[in-house]
Image (tube, helix red, strand yellow):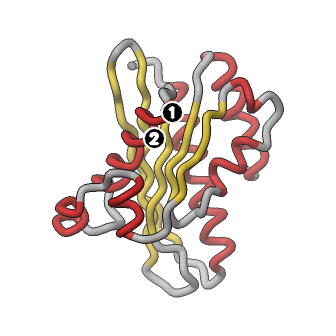
Amino acid sequence: MELEDLAKRVAVALMNKEFTICTAEECTCGLVGATIASQEYAQRWYKGTITTYTEMEAAEVLDVMPSAILRCGFVSSQVAQQMAMKVLNTFSANIAVAVVGHVDDYEGNDVQICVAKSSNSRISFKYKKINVENKDKGKNIEDAIKGALRATLECIMDEGD
């Protein structure tokens, strides 16, 4: 599925559920938020993005605990969850998407995604790990954005919450 189609599906799902969304991004440099915000009527449901690019900034700005980075590594579901929780609370949104990883143009890159959903006074999480194996950094970033949008769509549509 193309990036624009995924973004439209996320936008429609957000509007149908009357949810709001925000993002915390590292390796995608705010492009998940920009992709979402480019959709029609985004001002109704898009709350914002916080972007950091280093471990130090993630710890300072997104309240990622240095102990989590030491214990699990920076590219981990634990770090992604802490990033998601920070923006979920900062923006008082229903959905928070966090993306952390390595998207450089060499093999062995991983991206961790955490989507937090606040519904009925409960927070649930959806995790996704993406292996980006392209020699093209731009393609790796696009794959990470698509993965984040797919995980977001699944989380929004999950009725179990």
Q: Residue at x 41, y 58 (%)?
A: 112
Residue of label 1: 91
Q: Residue at x 66, y 27 (%)?
A: 45
Check whether the beta carbons of the residues at disc 1 and disc 2 lie within 8 A of each other.
Answer: yes
Q: Residue at x 32, y 67 (%)?
A: 74
Q: Is residue 93 left or right of residue 11?
A: left
Q: Residue at x 26, y 68 (%)?
A: 73
C-alpha separation, residue under disc 1 versus residue under disc 2? 6 Å
- Name which residue type carries label 1: Phe
Number of the label disc, if any, that sits on residue 161: none
- Name which residue type carries label 2: Val
Is 9 rendered above or below residue 57?
Answer: above
**Nearest the camera: 22 or 112?**
22
Residue of label 2: 87
**Nearest the camera: 23 or 152?**
23
Q: Is residue 149 left or right of residue 109?
A: right
| Quarter of the figure with the C terminus | top left
Which element type, helix, strand or loop, lies under badge 1? helix
In the picture as drawn, the residue positioned furthest to the right comes out as: 40
Q: Is residue 46 left or right of residue 127?
A: right
Which element type, helix, strand or loop, lies under badge 2? helix
Is 136 rendered above or below residue 97?
Answer: below
Q: Position of residue 46 (x, y in %)?
A: 65, 33
Is 27 rendered above or below residue 83?
Answer: below
Q: Position of residue 70 (x, y in %)?
A: 19, 69
Q: Residues within 10 Å of mark 1 (few under 14, many from 20)?
A: some
